[in-house]
């Protein structure tokens, strides 16, 4: 548990450093420009306090400003980005060196320039996004430089008077700055944690919304299936009886000598009988398609895949007008699963293929259904010679509500639900395509041992 928490904290700190790096660089460059401005503006202080040193101090200010500008240019390079901590510390120390030198060549501990040393220290703790070690390093270097500058005037370099007073003020400034730095850094890290947590929650929320959309689509499809089931049950009851009566009447009529002697009448009766038998087959297919089994039962159920193909082709007969359907199925196609659900998958694949080929206006639209046994799974390929699927859409075809059809032509749920159905059967549904040539839909079903 402890090792896991340590790993999480390490990753969090890594992410924090990566995100704040550019912020630190931008802030460092901005403050460096301000620092250059203040250093150059300090010529007014030189004129007011030490006019006799004005030109020498002005040259020092120019040199330090040029050096800080050079560091700014370095910070904007790829090398400088990796060394931003050190470069920021360096440009802050440069004015401290300059001010300490000015203290040393003027009045030592009694020089008013000692107040200038506090500016960089307070800036590092309050304004700059410094780390605690950078702040302590800057404070330590500043105090060391001040002590050296004061040592150049032995008369004031004693543990009392101005030196002691200024030293204590400097140490107070370092302590205050360090505390501010610590809490500022802690606040920034806490904000980063909150931002990271919110981002994770948003990702989880998006995932939940996608799942809810898929569940909603599946529930909608289930309701449609239930409605079709109720309708087909009524149709089966209401249509089968009159169909049976008609078939019986046709059989009787066909045995009549008058019908046998009249060729045209005999052919008409034969056509009528075939039509009524087709009605029986359609109602039977509709019943098979509509009555979905519970998942627990579908795992134990078995059916002939070739029969499911025939039912799907008959039920999509209107959409497949003008489309050539070819089969290449093995002799044994007994698989395990819910026949109605697989019929639904095939209907969806055939309907999509027919619509795509109709858009392409193919002169010889063809759908080929092939299946082969591989490692106790029946691998099925439904291929059309339509316009294909664009590469940017191929990875999204199974997303809920994704569709390339015109508005009002579909909800974009068919392939998503089909994917879920095949997944429930222990298989996978995938798509392959060559734009302008063909599209393949591939899935597999379990063999009955």
Image: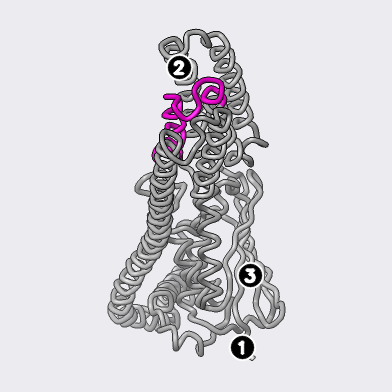
Q: Quadrant of the C terminus?
A: bottom right
| Residue at mark 1 | 448
Q: Which numbered disc, 2 or 1, marks the residue that appears first in the sequence?
A: 2
Are the two marked residues, 3 and 2, in contact with CB atoms closer than 8 angstroms? Answer: no
Q: Position of residue 289 (x, y in %)?
A: 42, 74
Between the C-alphas of marks 2 and 1, the distance is 92 Å
Q: Which numbered disc, 1 or 3, marks the residue that appears first in the sequence?
A: 3
Residue 266 can be seen, yes or no = no
The kind of secondary structure the magenta stretch mainly shows is: helix
Observer-side mark, 2 or 1, equals: 2
Q: Is residue 422 above or below residue 143?
A: below
State the residue at coordinates (58%, 34%): 148
Are the two marked residues, 2 and 1, in contact with CB atoms closer than 8 angstroms? Answer: no
Q: Position of residue 195 (x, y in %)?
A: 40, 53
Between the C-alphas of marks 3 and 2, the distance is 83 Å
Between the C-alphas of marks 1 and 3, the distance is 16 Å
Which element carries disc 3, helix, strand or loop? strand
| Residue at mark 3 | 380
Which element carries disc 2, helix, strand or loop? loop
Q: Position of residue 396 (x, y in %)?
A: 52, 54
Pick whichever, 109 or 205, lies toward us: 109
- Horizontal arrangement in the rendering, residue 356 relative to residue 283 (left or right): right
Is the image coloured rainbow, by chain, by secondary structure, or in one colour?
Answer: one colour
Pick whichever, 52 or 410, lies toward us: 52
Tell me where the magenta segment starts and ends, as one range.
Answer: 101-128
Q: Is residue 256 above or below residue 272?
A: below
In terms of image quadrants, where is residue 206?
bottom left
- Horizontal arrangement in the rendering, residue 324 relative to residue 172 (left or right): right
Q: Is residue 119 rendered magenta in the image?
A: yes
| Residue at mark 2 | 42
Label 1 crowding class (10 Å Cα cut-off): few <14, some 14-19, many 20+?
A: some
Which element carries disc 1, helix, strand or loop? loop
């Amino acid at each position: 548990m402890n090792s896991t928490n340590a790993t999480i904290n390490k990753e969090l700190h890594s992410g924090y450093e990566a995100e704040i790096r550019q912020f630190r660089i931008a802030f460092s460059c901005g403050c460096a420009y301000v620092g250059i401005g203040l250093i150059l503006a300090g010529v007014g202080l030189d004129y007011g306090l030490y006019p006799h040193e004005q030109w020498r101090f002005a040259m020092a200010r120019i040199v330090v400003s040029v050096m800080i500008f050079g560091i700014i240019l370095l910070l904007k390079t790829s090398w400088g980005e990796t060394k931003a901590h050190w470069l920021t510390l360096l440009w802050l120390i440069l004015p401290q060196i300059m001010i300490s030198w000015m203290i040393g060549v003027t009045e030592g501990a009694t020089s008013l320039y000692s107040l200038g040393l506090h500016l960089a220290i307070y800036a590092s703790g309050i304004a700059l996004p410094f780390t605690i070690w950078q702040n302590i390093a800057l404070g330590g270097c500043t105090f060391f430089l001040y002590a050296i500058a004061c040592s150049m005037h032995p008369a004031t370099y004693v543990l009392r008077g101005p030196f002691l007073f200024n030293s204590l003020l400097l140490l107070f400034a370092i302590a205050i700055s360090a505390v501010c730095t610590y809490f500022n850094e802690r606040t920034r890290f806490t904000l980063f944690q909150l931002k990271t947590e919110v981002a994770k929650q948003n990702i989880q929320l998006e995932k939940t919304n996608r799942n809810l959309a898929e569940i909603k689509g599946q529930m909608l499809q289930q309701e449609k299936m239930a409605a079709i089931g109720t309708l087909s049950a009524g149709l089966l009851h209401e249509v089968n009886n009159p169909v049976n009566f008609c078939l019986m009447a046709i059989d009787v009529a066909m045995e009549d000598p008058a019908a046998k002697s009249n060729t045209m009448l005999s052919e008409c009766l034969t056509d009528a009988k075939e039509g009524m038998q087709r009605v029986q087959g359609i109602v039977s297919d509709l019943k098979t398609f509509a009555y979905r089994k519970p998942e627990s039962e579908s795992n134990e159920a078995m059916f002939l895949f070739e029969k499911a193909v025939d039912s799907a082709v008959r039920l999509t007969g209107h959409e497949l007008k003008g489309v050539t359907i070819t089969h290449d199925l093995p002799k044994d196609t007994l698989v395990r699963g819910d026949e109605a659900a697989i019929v639904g998958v095939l209907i969806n694949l055939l309907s999509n293929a027919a619509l795509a080929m109709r858009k392409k206006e193919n002169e010889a639209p063809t759908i080929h259904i092939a299946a082969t046994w591989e490692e106790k799974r029946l691998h099925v390929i439904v291929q059309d010679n339509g316009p294909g699927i664009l590469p940017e859409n191929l990875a999204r075809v199974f997303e809920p509500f994704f569709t390339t059809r015109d508005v009002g032509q579909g909800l974009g749920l068919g392939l998503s639900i089909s994917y879920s159905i095949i997944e429930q059967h222990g298989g996978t549904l995938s798509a392959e395509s060559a734009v302008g040539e063909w599209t393949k839909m591939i899935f597999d079903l379990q063999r009955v041992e």
